[in-house]
Image: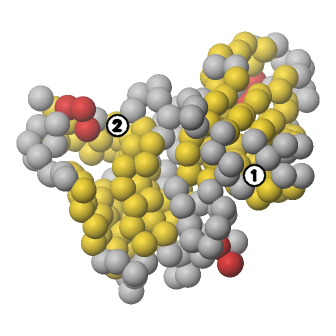
Amino acid sequence: NAGVTQTPKFRVLKTGQSMTLLCAQDMNHEYMYWYRQDPGMGLRLIHYSVGEGTTAKGEVPDGYNVSRLKKQNFLLGLESAAPSQTSVYFCASMEGGASNQPQHFGDGTRLSIL
Amino acid sequence: GENVEQHPSTLSVQEGDSAVIKCTYSDSASNYFPWYKQELGKRPQLIIDIRSNVGEKKDQRIAVTLNKTAKHFSLHITETQPEDSAVYFCAATPPRNTGGFKTIFGAGTRLFVKA
């Protein structure tokens, strides 16, 4: 049981390049999230998904797109990377059901845009 | 929308002393309050949580208290150790039937435990 796995762990991009971050969870969780964390700051929600085939915007969605074609995977795309998107990106998943549960985080992807 | 305020932003204590981190939330419907610990370069990990039908919960050196009337909850760490040094995040979540799939995080408290 690996939990939440993010790939890649590190990446350096040039401005204008595109890339996709992959998040995979093996806990059969309904909900999945993408956050960014900048130095000395908290977690800001980019996009989230409440189930396969559904996505929604968080508080900082501009410049990012997401897809959840399979329940276990949640992809975060940067179409045209900008230096302001240099950050650590965390994926998280959460169990569905009637009562609230904690979120489970991946190890993060450290992304630098030059 | 829902907001969670966390204080202090930085806390420095001597090893063996207690540390207290306080959070307030704005949505009175919130009913689940997890606390996460994030060590340097690592993922946030759940350390304790409390539900709205409970006023206090304890797990070894860690305890959390909840005051629903004041919309206030706190993390207490006793007998602090250097390995407690980390960033701690509080969070609040509304009920599932009112959109409780979005957890609102506080800005974090950086705790330093001096040996």
| Circle 2 SS class | strand
> What chain does mark 1 sit on?
A
**Residue A56 locus on image (x, y percent):** 82, 56
Between disc 1 and disc 2, the foreground one is 1
- Position of residue A45 relative to residue B81, above or below, is below
Residue B57, percent across and down?
28, 67
Mark 2 is surrounded, within 10 Å at the Cα level, by few (under 14), some (14 to 19) or many (20 or more) other residues, namely many
Residue A96 is tagged as none
Q: Nearer the viewer, residue A49 or B17?
A: A49
Residue that carries the numbered disc 1 in the rendered image: A48
Identified by mark 1, the residue type is: Tyr
* Above or below B67: residue B23: above
Secondary structure, mark 1, is strand
The residue under the point 89% across, 52% down is A53
Location of mark 2 (residue): B86
Report how far apart the C-alphas of labels 1 and 2 lie in the structure.
26 Å
Q: Chain of mark 2?
A: B
Residue A31 percent coordinates (x, y): 70, 54
- Give the camera-side residue of A56 and A31: A31
Occupied quadrant, residue B94: bottom right
- The answer to whether residue A55 is seen in the rendering is no
Q: Amino acid at mark 2?
A: Ala
Which residue is found at the position 28% from the left and 35% from the top? B85
Residue B83 in percent (x, y) is at 24, 32
Residue A83 visible in this rendered orientation of the protein:
yes
